[in-house]
Image (cartoon, rainbow, N blue to C red):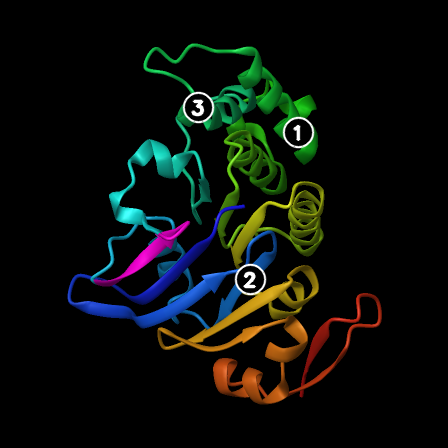
Amino acid sequence: MTRLAATGLTLGYDDRVVVDALDVEILEGRVTTIVGANACGKSTLLRGLARLLKPRAGTVLLDDRPLDVLSTLEVAQVLGVLPQTPVAPDGITVGDLVGRGRHPHQGWFRRWTEADETAVADALDATGTEDLVARPLRELSGGQRQRVWVAMALAQQTDVLLLDEPTTYLDLNHQVELLRLLRELNHRSGKTIVVVLHELNLAARFSDHMVAMADGRIVAQGAPGEVVTADLVRDVFGLDCLVVPDPVAGSPLVVPL
């Protein structure tokens, strides 16, 4: 298993600090969700953990090694990243896009191997997208596209998968389907999954560990039952609520007042 953590991490854009001197450790083999109000630093933290944003201070550690001393290839073989708004070449098919997830495992001449074929087939099967393989990505629905992007990340066969708001723009049914898929992948493979989410009830239902942020700081972290309280929801989201057990999953359920 791969250990991902950060110490004293400070991140920002131009002259604005967004995440300030933050310490966090991602639980190995678990699903972790990062939650908080808009502009609290959730996506910025994920970008820092993924080496998409250079720290102004502090260190991101991958198996106790600073992330910034590793080569791009080494990082890509261990960390799979799905940004909030991924961009694909115009006209690319599902099969070609998912196949790009194999690039970190191929040599200089991009020679396609049986291992690549198996990895892509497994990723398509896991996401239920094998029947879409010949279709252009632009023709798919939002839910189908998200599953295809997840398939590309899975084809990378990394120990850790980082996803930035993967349920954005999806209707409720597709949100639940996607999070259920990630939960099943974690159960089957033990893959460490980190997801930035807006929807607090879904985050509580589908995660093992939650990290709640406000103003670039971590204000609570732990199991959903420890993190999701009426006081935290009021302090972080400005919402008065009751927190009751979900009648199906038993996880905390936020009921606005």
User: Is residue 200 positioned above or below 5 on the image?
Assistant: below
Task: Name the secondary structure under disc 3.
Answer: helix
- Inspect the image, locate mark 1, and give the three-letter code of the amino acid beneath it: Thr
Judge from the rendering whether residue 50 lies leftward or rightward of residue 29; answer left or right.
left
Q: Which residue in the protein does label 3 denote?
A: 105
Q: Quadrant of residue 230?
A: bottom right
Q: Which residues are magenta?
A: 57-64
Residue sitting nearer the eye, 135 or 34: 34
Kindly report the secondary structure that dominates the magenta region of the rendered protein: strand
User: Which circle's residue, 2 or 1, is located before the other in the chain?
Assistant: 2
User: Which circle's residue, 3 or 2, is located before the other in the chain?
Assistant: 2
Question: Looking at the image, which residue is at 40% across and 35% down?
Answer: 76
- Inspect the image, locate mark 3, and give the three-letter code of the amino acid beneath it: His
Q: Residue furthest front?
A: 64
Question: Looking at the image, which residue is at 59% across and 32% down?
Answer: 140
Task: Name the secondary structure under disc 2.
Answer: strand
Judge from the rendering whether residue 109 lies leftward or rightward of residue 96; answer left or right.
left
- Asked whether residue 167 is drawn in magenta, I would say no
